[in-house]
Image (cartoon, helix red, strand yellow):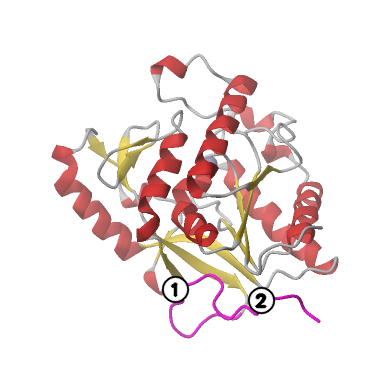
Amino acid sequence: MTELPERRLMLVHAHPDDESINNGATMARHAAEGGHVTLVTCTLGERGEVIPPELRHLSGAALGGHRLGELREAMAALGVTDFRLLGGAGRYSDSGMMGLPDNDDPGCFWQADVDQAAGLLADVILEVRPQVLVTYDDNGGYGHPDHIQAHRVAMRAVELAAARGWDVPKVYWNRVPRSVAEDAFARLERDLPELPFDKSASVGDVPGVVDDERITTAVDGTAYAGAKAAAMRAHATQITVADQPYFVLSNELAQPLFTTEYYELVRGERPAGREDDLFAGVTTGEPS
Ligand SMILES: [Zn+2]
């Protein structure tokens, strides 16, 4: 295998766009600082609602193909070259929102055998040997079946990879501290009249919001705000980004765009204070 950079970050996500919304600034910063970033996306988001009227004819595999192109463009904006679909593009399809008949489709990710999918992800972990892996909490951040399944598969893959020779030292879940979300929505209420959006979402619409004391890590990606916004814009079927740091999904409810990204460490030694780097305390270089 070709030599990889010392710092290796892996992110496991459900659909194209999740990586840019949750971790775009972290990914851009890490790549710019010479680290290796591996994104594993579990589905192509074939059941996503499409925002631009001129693209609304796209659905199913055609939408999946289009979204793969959007993902490619987003990764170029973030400077990330290593991005993969779990098991190859089209292996697992989007499960749709919780409770819909879509959830029963035998090819959808929600119906996937967790151990089998985790085995595929463990292969990637063993190839890349990341010191840091980022995914969602056990509710998938907000209850979407593919996000919950991405969590299960990622956590199981970490166990399988450990048994097969690479024990990922640090695993994080995507988070937003409640106080940060509340402040951002207060600002959004104030700015709303000047925004191209009519209505605001609320704190409850933001995935992964928890009490501040659970946050172990804050990655300041302010310098990469432009890259993150560009990556989010690349996912044009799913996201509309305003000039100000706000965006909407297909529900048209305005949300703040965070350029400091927050995490909760769930594997590895919990730091005494808050870390400002996902690799804090990680010994790089190969074990002798
Ligand atoms: Zn998603």
Q: CA distance from mark 1 to mark 2?
A: 17 Å
Q: Which residue is mark 2?
A: 284
Residue 220 sits in quarter? bottom left
Image x and y of residue 62, in percent: 61, 20
Q: Would you say residue 98 is visible in this rendering?
A: no
Is label 1 in contact with label 2 (beta carbons under 8 Å)?
A: no
Q: Residue 276's mark?
A: 1
Query: Which one is in front, 256 or 207?
Result: 256
Query: Which one is in front, 185 or 56?
Result: 56
Q: Which amino acid lies under the numbered mark 2 shown in the image of this protein?
A: Thr
Query: Which one is in front, 25 or 137?
Result: 25
Q: Which amino acid lies under the numbered mark 1 shown in the image of this protein?
A: Asp
Task: Tell me: residue 70, above or below residue 25.
Answer: above
Q: Left or right: where does residue 109 sit relative to residue 224?
A: right
Residue 209 sits in quarter? bottom left
Is disc 2 placed on a helix, strand or loop? Answer: loop
Q: Left or right: where does residue 112 sit relative to residue 6?
A: right
Picture quarter with the C terminus: bottom right
Image x and y of residue 14, in percent: 59, 44
Residue 249 sits in quarter? top left
Q: Would you say residue 187 is visible in this rendering?
A: yes
Task: Look at the image and give the residue range highlighted in magenta.
Answer: 269-288
In the image, residue 248 lies in the stretch drawn in magenta: no
> Which residue is found at the position 68% from the left and 38% from the top?
109
Q: Residue 77's mark?
A: none
Ligand 1 within 8 angstroms of badge 1 C-beta:
no
Q: Is the residue marked by circle 1 packed among few (<14), some (14-19), or many (20+) residues within 10 Å? A: some
Task: Tell me: residue 115, above or below residue 283.
Answer: above
> Which residue is found at the position 43% from the left and 30% from the top?
236
> Which residue is found at the position 82% from the left and 58% from the top?
1
